[in-house]
Image (cartoon, rainbow, N blue to C red):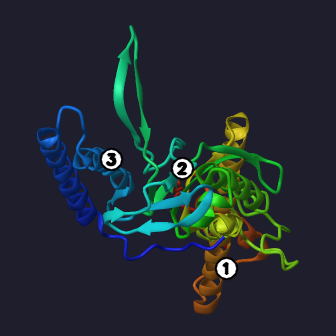
Amino acid sequence: MEEKVLSGKKHGMFTLLCCVAVMLLAVAGVAYGAIIAGEDEISPLLIVSVVVLCVAWIPLAGLRILKPQEALVLTLFGKYVGTLKGEGFYAVNPFCSSINPAANTKLNQSGDVKTVKSVFGVKSDDETVSVGVTDKRISLKIMTLSNNRQKINDCLGNPVEIGIAVTWKIVDTAKAVFNVDNYKEYLSLQCDSALRNIVRIYPYDVSPNVDTTGDGLADEGSLRGSSEVVAERIKNEIQQRVEIAGIEVVEARITYLAYAPEIAAVMLQRQQASAIIDARKMIVDGAVGMVEMALDRLKEHGTVNLDEERKAQMVSNLLVVLCGNRDAQPVVNSGSVQ
């Protein structure tokens, strides 16, 4: 169903003034008709004024007030009439009704504020029960949805906890109201579903022989290292799913990412061990390079001539000094080198 925006309906103030004027004239007609009426007959003016007074308030039921970035979907006896958009004081068919199936739905998001206008309240011992009319206006502002954290297995089977924040807005009110039962609940469900589909493609950390792009080649994609790419894929996945509901996804961001508590300690030890191994490898590579440079410089300048056994001892001592965790303790050799 396509959205139909109603234009030229900003006649609310004119309609209000006309109704008030007609009602005042009807009251005056009732009073004057009662004065001129005889004892045995009723003045026609009195009858007409009473009838006008009874029906003059009906157009007031069609008055609608909208604030900036608000919309109102109208139906007439079950048929979609159109949508009011933009701020203003509108006058529509008084028999039109407003529809917003998500008016009472409260999610963990911005924009979900109290929308029930209290008419009267019944106060009990622990709470106040309000009875009122639900506001049917639809917000066109950008809102942020932040669902609960999800526990999902990554492509390696490791359980991770992840949370996302999705900013969205309604661009087609007719689709939002008529194509889905409740567009807020629909968006929340599709966000969780899209999140699970994308997270299962990636490992938590970079792992060998893992294809995250679908081209058949291993890459270095991961949830922790490629958060921008993952967030963009989640956004596109959600957008494809909520297009039917007239919703535009502006942005999706990862707000929380961690291993599940049951494996967090083990994975932390694994990361620490991997970091130590990488650091040791770098130290050894640097130490070997320095030893090779020292031997080459000694040979180039002819500073000292060393046989293979002496070279082996020197290499061993240098590697111990360069790769050790503690400061080297110098030993002075007072003997002669042959």
Q: CA distance from mark 1 to mark 2?
A: 57 Å
Side of 213 where 94 appears, left or right: left
| x and y, in percent, of residue 288 in the image | 68, 72
Lower position in the chain sequence, tag 2 or tag 3:
3
Q: Quadrant of residue 294?
A: bottom right
From this viewpoint, which residue is outermost toward the front?
40
Secondary structure under badge 2? Answer: loop
Q: Is residue 80 above or below residue 265?
A: below
**Nearer-the-camera pick, 259 or 127:** 127
Q: Is residue 143 above or below residue 82?
A: above
Q: Who's the residue at 23% across and 63% down the image?
A: 13
Lower position in the chain sequence, tag 1 or tag 2:
2
Residue identified by numbered label 1: 292
Residue identified by numbered label 2: 146
| x and y, in percent, of residue 115 in the image | 41, 42
Residue identified by numbered label 3: 51
Inspect this view and state whether residue 114 appears: no
Q: Are marks 2 and 3 in contact (CB under 8 Å)?
A: no
